[in-house]
Image (spheres, rainbow, N blue to C red):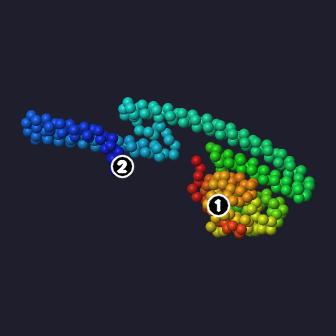
Amino acid sequence: MEIFKIYIRKQGGKILFYLLFSTVFFFLFQMYQIPLHAAFYAVSVGGVFGIAVLIFQFMKFRQKYIQLERAVNQKEFLLENLPKAEDGLEEEYEKILEHLYKNIQDMENVHNEKEQDMLEYYTLWVHQIKTPIASMYLKLQSEDSEFSREIGTDLMRIEQYVEMVLCYLRLDSSERDYVFREYSLDSIIKQAVRRFAPQFIRKKIKLEYETTNAIILTDEKWLLFVIEQLLSNSLKYTKPGGCISLQWKPQQILVVKDTGIGIAKEDLPRIFEKGYTGYNGREDKKASGIGLYLCKRICEKLGYGIRAESEIHKGTEIILDLKRKKLEIE
């Protein structure tokens, strides 16, 4: 029905011209006293012929309209999918489209090259900066003092920020390095816990974790990043003597729960937004507002769900739904 309305509007001039011509035709017959039934016969024949032409043209118009609609709705726009030009005006429009399409392709190629160069540069930068960080870790191991432990914690935070930079760039680049295999969830969790073990010990925070024996289809590198970010946040906002737990539920749900300062009710809906730090971040002055945003984006790429529940001064729960949904891979 919508296509028919568009077609009638397009042919409105021709229909109006026919009606005007018929009126003048009748007027002339009456003026020269020619029997009106002859004029009516001529107009009727012309009308039937005109309606037949309109119906034929409408079928062609409908076919072209549907083809255009499909071309527009396709994920990747291709000029080859457009209907063939039928007259000189459409050919000129086609030339304009080809010129615009070529310009867009050229701009995309230039953008992708620059993006790839930037990604390669920062990847190299990350690997280079990790070398002195690892060296400093080794030097600190020879000394066991409160000062060396604090420096070690700061070094770990620097290393996390460096990894977040690389993760952020890879998420928004055209490169998608996801490798899905079956992994032991316990193996991934233990890697994350092992990394933060010194902070658990230094802050005297209790860890509650029972073996899950779960096997999940995932990308180990990216899921490990998510769990590390969640543990890092819990450690940051849980006071000494508190507790952090990792709970596995039968519905393939992993809950990272802490007894930290909690998240204000008004901040909770926005904690996964890029750059949003909320009240806790403003108080802490060290929050970047990127960690949970990256977790959300990665979970979307992996086909997982992530949400948060929290109560101020009582703690926070981050719920990871590890049942894979439709992947967001382009």
Task: Evaluate whether residue 172 shows in this view.
Answer: yes
Left or right: 38, with 308 as reference point: left
Left or right: 36, with 8 as reference point: left
**Residue type of the residue flagged with mark 1:** Asp
Q: Secondary structure at mark 1?
A: loop
Instruction: Report the front residue among 145 and 103.
Output: 145
Please, is residue 202 above or below residue 130 in the view? below
Question: Residue 33, located in which quarter of the rendered image?
Answer: top left
Q: Residue at x 91, y 57 (%)?
A: 144
Q: Which residue is mark 1?
A: 267
Q: Secondary structure at mark 2?
A: helix
Instruction: Report the front residue among 283 and 153.
Output: 283
Rounded to the nearest angstrom, the CA distance separating label 1 from label 2 is 45 Å
Work out whether mark 1 precedes mark 2 in sequence or the reverse, and give the earlier one. Answer: 2
Residue 2 is tagged as: 2
Please, is residue 27 above or below residue 267 in the view? above
**Residue type of the residue flagged with mark 2:** Glu
Question: Residue 309, located in which quarter of the rendered image?
Answer: bottom right
Q: Residue at x 75, y 57 (%)?
A: 284
Please, is residue 244 above or below residue 33 in the view? below
Q: Position of residue 293 (x, y in %)?
A: 66, 54
Left or right: 158, with 142 as reference point: left
Task: Evaluate whether residue 213 shows in this view.
Answer: no
Q: Position of residue 235 (x, y in %)?
A: 76, 61
Q: Residue at x 64, y 44 (%)?
A: 173
Q: Residue at x 34, y 50 (%)?
A: 1
**Label 2: how many residues lie within 10 Å, few (<14), some (14-19) or many (20+)?**
few
Question: Residue 206, located in which quarter of the rendered image?
Answer: bottom right
Q: Position of residue 246 (x, y in %)?
A: 72, 66
Q: Position of residue 318 (x, y in %)?
A: 67, 63
Residue 199 is tagged as: none
